[in-house]
Amino acid sequence: MKKTFRILSISTVIICLLLIINTGCTDGKKLIVSDLKCEYISNPLGVDIQQPRFSWTISSELRGVSQSAYRILVAGSPGKLHRKQGDIWDSGKVLSDKSTNIIFQGIPLQSGKKYYWNISVWNHDEKQSYRSETAYFQTGLLSMSDWEAQWITAGDTSLAAPLFRKEFEVNKQIRHAYVYVTGVGNYELYLNGEKVGRNVLDPGMTDFRKRILYSTYDVTEQLKKGLNVAGVILGDGAYRIYRVKDRYGWGGRGLCINTPRTILQLDITYMDGSKSQIITDKSWKFSDSPIIFNHLFGGEDYDARLEKPGWFSAGFDMSDWQEVAVVSTPGVVLQSQLMPPMKIVKTIHPVAETNPEPGVYLYDMGQNFPGWWRLHVKGASGVTLRIRGAETLNDSIFPKSLQPGDHLSTKHAYHSRVWTDYTLKGDGTEVYEPRFFYTGFRYVEVTTGNPDSLESLEIEGRVVHSALEHNGQFVTSDSLLNRIYRAAKWSQIGNTHSVPTDCPHREKGGYTGDGQIIAETSIHDFQMASFYTKWLNDMRDSQFENGRIPNTSPTLVGGHGGGIAWGSAYVLLPWWMYQYYNDIRIMEDHYLTMKHYLNYLYNLAKTDANPGESYIINDFGGYWDSLGEWCAPGQSDGPNHPMVNTYYYYLNTSVMAKIAVVLGHNDDALKYSALADTVKRELNKKFFDPETNLYGTDTLYQTYQLLALAGDIVPEGHREEVLQNLIDDISITHNGHLNTGIIGTKYLWQVLAHAGRCDLAYTVATQTTYPGYGYWLANGATTLWEKWSGKNSHNHQMFGSVSEFFYKYLAGIRSPMDWETTSGYKHIHIQPYVPDGLSSVEASLKTIKGIVESGWQNQSGSFRLRVVIPANSDASISIPLLDFENISVTENGNPVWVNRAFVEGVPGVTNAFIGKEFITFSTGSGRYDFILSGD
């Protein structure tokens, strides 16, 4: 048999050797450097920070792998980086295991320039360097003086959504072109007939009177030689909210900052090195659009007969277009939108539809979701369709499957008075979806007075929210748990619209209380770092002169009140950012304004003090100023919660002391620590009864005990009694049900878990009767609701803290806030709880260090726990003993525990000890498969 051999040329061999040397990795199993991020974003455009930060992860199929050193190179071209020339920055070899938020320390960056970077790391034996692939970041406009463009607006302020247009010539070959653009309230940008980017409802909501976000796009491929056209459509958004007769407007509240406006700067660099610039100025023209009405709350109306075909293409007749007005925005800072933009992330189709009467078409999308509808319709010109959405049918509290004879609920104005009207142009199949409005709904109704003029009609649902990266996954053998987790996650995405909102329909406000309560859950489910960085800037912008943080940030939508639990978001979020992301800069950036907030709390306690109670924060201001526990079952949401206020006063001071320690402000640390001790002492003096071992005297029984236990406030010698009172109230008085609102529910899971009562927490989480998550699901919920009873909104995220229980305790991936896992997941503790009747749990979590996985199966005669620990971390893995005796443990088939003793020799497993309930193994990074068996 003849054999044919492929002969490698000498040049091919040399190239292969060079590739091996270049990567520095001769064994693919050893180390991979990946997931390179600049300011938490992969290859970001528009970085407007002079000292951006770099992060990366390392992975390996080997165990016990860690980083001992790194070297960062930043270059002005890929070629220089390939030659290992860091002409912008060469960090040199830095002996450190740090891989998150490394601060750029090179020469000053220039606006509008693309920089290339990579990482070389040394593993724990310091013998070999592993180099990453090339990443890049492109700077935005680093200074307000870099903006040559001017703000422009339509001269006719009555236009609902004006069009803006500019033609320009490109006569050379383009090297690259970047556009920096924004428009308030919202905008869409078009170049040569194509929309630029996939963002919707841009920019993210801020206090537009102080700060407006802009986006950066690489439009090199969208420009062409010859005549080009730039076009912008403007909507009102949160910039112009006004009262509208018959349309919903969040209580009729009007907030009109000014007429919508846009600013755009297109910087073009040609192959010959020359440059040109297209900016918004007086040379632009404007006209009306087919959008004849748009309102953040009330909806959007569109008359297709008013379309201007080809308006964003070259050669369009602009003879009847008018000159724009150049306007100023004094005091407003333009800042790059370095956070996930809002996008259409999914399209869903009806699961059922009916035609209950002529001209009425009703659709069940099968899922409550945020966004809008998309219409495919064919019919006669002039026919108008009205499209509305709602969360329930037949004015019922509960949703259900669509049946013939059902009708859309009209009980809530935020559904009945919200719609889009679409008027057909009569030209084949027409496709329409809103641009400048979103809502939350499950059911869609389309009505028309001319049903005989319709030839076809289809409806789709468009899911719209901030396009967050999904970090966490959780699935079990129990369908109820899976449905609760899914509903909680849908409510989170349903309320991430550039800020954490309360709901996607009624208020759409960045409520600080809701946001801080759900923050840890959201950090588990999504990559929240850049999202929260932006929101903290919103809080700083909204801070009152006296230091107060209002209940919504930004304050364009929602109120200005809020209790201490709401404003506390401004201290708690930076601390969680440090704990989960090892982000020190966020605490540094906000330290002075956080101190200002602490001073506000101190002065508030002094000002409203009853005799001898100068560290107790009683009710203050009006109804909405002193909110406490919220949406507890069957209880009033009004003020009268000084225990809650004072607890959060204590929590803020104690957390601020920790922040001061991290930042090296030792005097402040001592001051806040002493203040926390004083508030704690006075809180116990005011609210604790040592005879009954109870906190508080009103009906918020569970919440008060939970706060005291969570904050370690209970006086020495009384903790067990307070805990037992809480347990008795849950298990006996309320028959295994919670009686908490959003605040108490947040702390219920960790208090019971740390007390060794995960069994009771599991019972609470899986209740199918009122009040409980299973009660919601049994009554048709696909998201979490505002009230345990089902009244009001059916898409609120604030009770989603149950997912923390799933991740931390059922899967056992303990978080940094459990004090068992170090900041930034350097050391990870895995310790699952195994309830009766549950046979398996699988969870994964993408942390700042890499992927953490924990999955277990409880089988007859054995318990299997599979764990993944990312490289550059180590772990304590605690396996529950359950009811086994004479146990033995293997890892991947190799014995690691026999005859009550640790068995050495398995790579990565370095030690073990046994306790009453768990056997704990110390491991390095890697993938582990433990099986515990016994009699």
Image (spheres, rainbow, N blue to C red):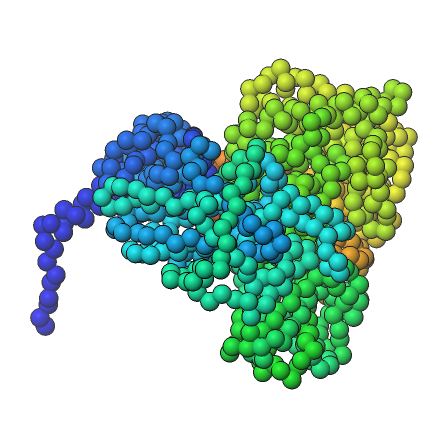
For this view, does 116 lie left or right of residue 201? left
Point 55% across, 23% down: residue: 663
Point 49% across, 50% down: residue: 323
Q: Establish if 178 lies above or below 355.
A: above
> The N terminus lies in which quarter of the figure?
bottom left
- Most distant residue in the bottom direction: 452
Image x and y of residue 552, in percent: 69, 41
**Is residue 259 visible to the viewer in this orientation of the structure?**
yes
Q: Nearer the viewer, residue 90 or 322?
A: 322
Point 74% across, 26% down: residue: 601
Image x and y of residue 218, in percent: 38, 49
- Number of labelled discs? 0
| Quadrant hosting residue 649 | top right
Q: Nearer the viewer, residue 651 or 889?
A: 651
Image x and y of residue 257, in percent: 64, 43
Q: Establish if 779 lies above or below 850.
A: below
Image x and y of residue 760, in percent: 75, 49
**Is residue 62 visible to the viewer in this orientation of the structure?**
no
Q: Nearer the viewer, residue 84 or 328?
A: 328
